[in-house]
Amino acid sequence: MLVPKCHITITQNTTGRSQVIEFDYLVDVDIDQNIETLTDTCTIKLPRKLTWGGTPIAVGDDTVNGKALFKRGDKITIQLGYDNIIKTRFIGYIKSIKSGVPVTLLCEDSMFLLKGKPVTKKFLATTLKDILLYILPVDIEYVAADMTIGDLQITNATPAKILEDLKSQGIFSYFRNITENGITRSVLYSGLAYWVEKRKSATFKFGTNEAVKNFGLIIKDDLEYVLAEDVSLKVKATSIAADNSRINVEVGDDDGEVRTVFKYKVSQADLTKFANSELERFKYTGYRGSFTTFGEPAVEKGDIAVIEGGKYNPDGSYLIRQVKVSSGLSGYQQTIYLDQILTQEAA
């Protein structure tokens, strides 16, 4: 039987010194990462009586100094797994601490660092890379798509707010956990919703009890297999010129679910062709919804879920839009939310 494991590392910087606090007993951890949101979040619940070097984690429990062990802005890394194999599932910072029973740490990923120090700047005929170079702290590692933004006026806005505003133009930005040579780091990716670079693929199966070390067992799901002709969908496409003027096109079903897409500096005719190609891509025959599996194989937003349906369910490969991870006394699980299909094979 596989035994869930949890290792939490909290790094504090006080008076020029770095203090590292580590503990590996099982606590309740909930992680939510989503392509659609700027910030990934994590909630950690700890026993109120926990202390470190005599200092309690809860405000008010220290009758001498009146201080708590953890503070807003402390860096936190969460590793989860089974037996002696653990993987980094979250890198971020403590946003707030709720005292009570248990004590709750509310955390955000590295986007937390981009929510201060507002900037004001006017860009003329600029690129995404130029904007990121100006607004990001020097120690933030990033990868940017090669795209022209045009003119952009920024007035007293934090880097996070600027990235949120760019998303309204179809420019997605979010942090990904990138592991190389056994070290995991947080890297900002900006420009695309899904990146091929450093994308992982994992297999999940219906109707089998084989070891989860080899592949993921789907233990419950709310998946619905839908034919393309039964999907009601509308695509709203926008082309943005260098001067920020826009051309808008709508194709598809009038009462359908709306998907919004963007192009830069294309004609109305080309925009219409693009919108129809996107409509065809979104109106696929395949699964929609989510499924829950054990914590391994670990996947993240932007990865690929390969579903093997077995005797009664169709196969297919899907982009992963969202992953919710939970670990605690009830076990280690992840719920995976699907986006568009990449490939499909009939059952």
Image (cartoon, grey):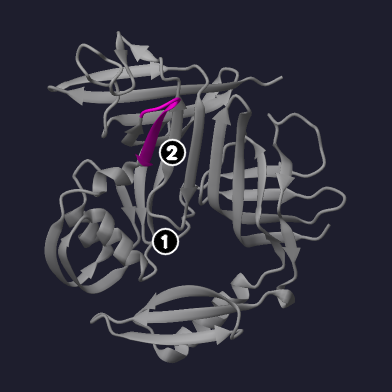
Mark 1 vs mark 2, CA separation in Å: 24 Å
Magenta stretch, main secondary structure, is strand
Indicate left or right for 108 with 273 as reference.
left
Q: Position of residue 59 (x, y in %)?
A: 29, 24
Check disc 1: other Cα within 10 Å, few if <14, some if 14-19, many if 20+.
some
- In the image, residue 40 above or below residue 329: below
- In the image, residue 192 above or below residue 205: below
Quadrant placement of the N terminus: top right
Q: Amino acid at mark 1?
A: Leu
Which element is circle 2 on?
Answer: strand
Residue 191 belongs to magenta span: no
Residue placed under numbered mark 1 in the picture? 192
Name which quarter of the figure residue 155 lies in.
bottom left
Q: Position of residue 343 (x, y in %)?
A: 68, 60
Q: Which region of the structure is painted magenta?
A: 99-108
The structure residue drawn at horizontal position 64% and vertical position 61%, both measured from the top left corner, is 341
Mark 1 or mark 2, whichever is nearer to me = 2
Q: Position of residue 237 (x, y in %)?
A: 46, 80
Quadrant placement of the C terminus: bottom right
Q: Compare residues 297 and 196 and report the one nearer the observer.
A: 297
Q: Compare residues 158 and 285 and report the one nearer the observer.
A: 158
**Outermost residue toward the right?**
311
Residue placed under numbered mark 2 in the picture? 42
The structure residue drawn at horizontal position 36% and vertical position 41%, both measured from the top left corner, is 108
Q: Position of residue 20 (x, y in %)?
A: 30, 19
Q: Amino acid at mark 2?
A: Cys
